[in-house]
Amino acid sequence: MDGWVTIKTYGYRYEADIAQQYLISHEINVFIKSDDARGLHPGLTFSSGVQVQVPEGDAEEAKALLEELDSSKTHLEIVKNEKSENKK
């Protein structure tokens, strides 16, 4: 069984949550590792950030997907486009 590896660290929980949902939409398992009490104490993340972890075997694909996400559009544009596509 593959171990889990950190592929990206974010400063804010919502950024990691967006990355998590994007990866899940591409059928990649994701685990968010953070010391922020599940978002209740966001100030605690400043020391270690919010880590996005995936199984080792999916790491390269997941990294490429997150690079695509970061370089192609802003997160809000992606959400807006997905909502408009769902209305069709």
Image (tube, rainbow, N blue to C red):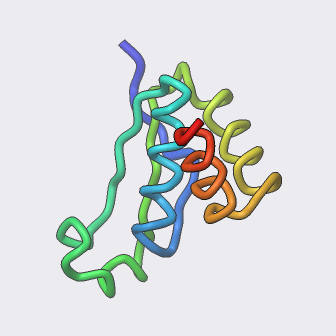
In the depicted structure, whether residue 76 falls above or below residue 27: below
Residue 66 as seen in the image, left or right of residue 5: right
Residue 28: x %, y % from top left: 48, 27
How many discs appear?
Answer: 0
Quadrant where the C terminus sits is: top right
Residue appearing at x 53%, y 66% in the figure: 10
Residue 40: x %, y % from top left: 19, 78
Identity of the residue furthest to the right in this view: 72
In the depicted structure, whether residue 64 falls above or below residue 82: above
Residue 24: x %, y % from top left: 46, 33
Q: Which of 75 and 86 is in front in this view?
A: 86
Residue 77 as seen in the image, left or right of residue 31: right
In the depicted structure, whether residue 39 falls above or below residue 6: below
In the depicted structure, whether residue 79 falls above or below residue 62: below
Residue appearing at x 49%, y 55% in the figure: 18
Identity of the residue furthest to the front in this view: 88
Identity of the residue furthest to the bottom in this view: 43
Residue appearing at x 31%, y 81% in the figure: 42
Residue 51: x %, y % from top left: 44, 56
Q: Which of 66 and 83 is in front in this view?
A: 83
Quadrant where the N terminus sits is: top left
Q: Which of 72 and 29 is in front in this view?
A: 72
Residue 62 as seen in the image, left or right of residue 18: right
Residue appearing at x 61%, y 58% in the figure: 80
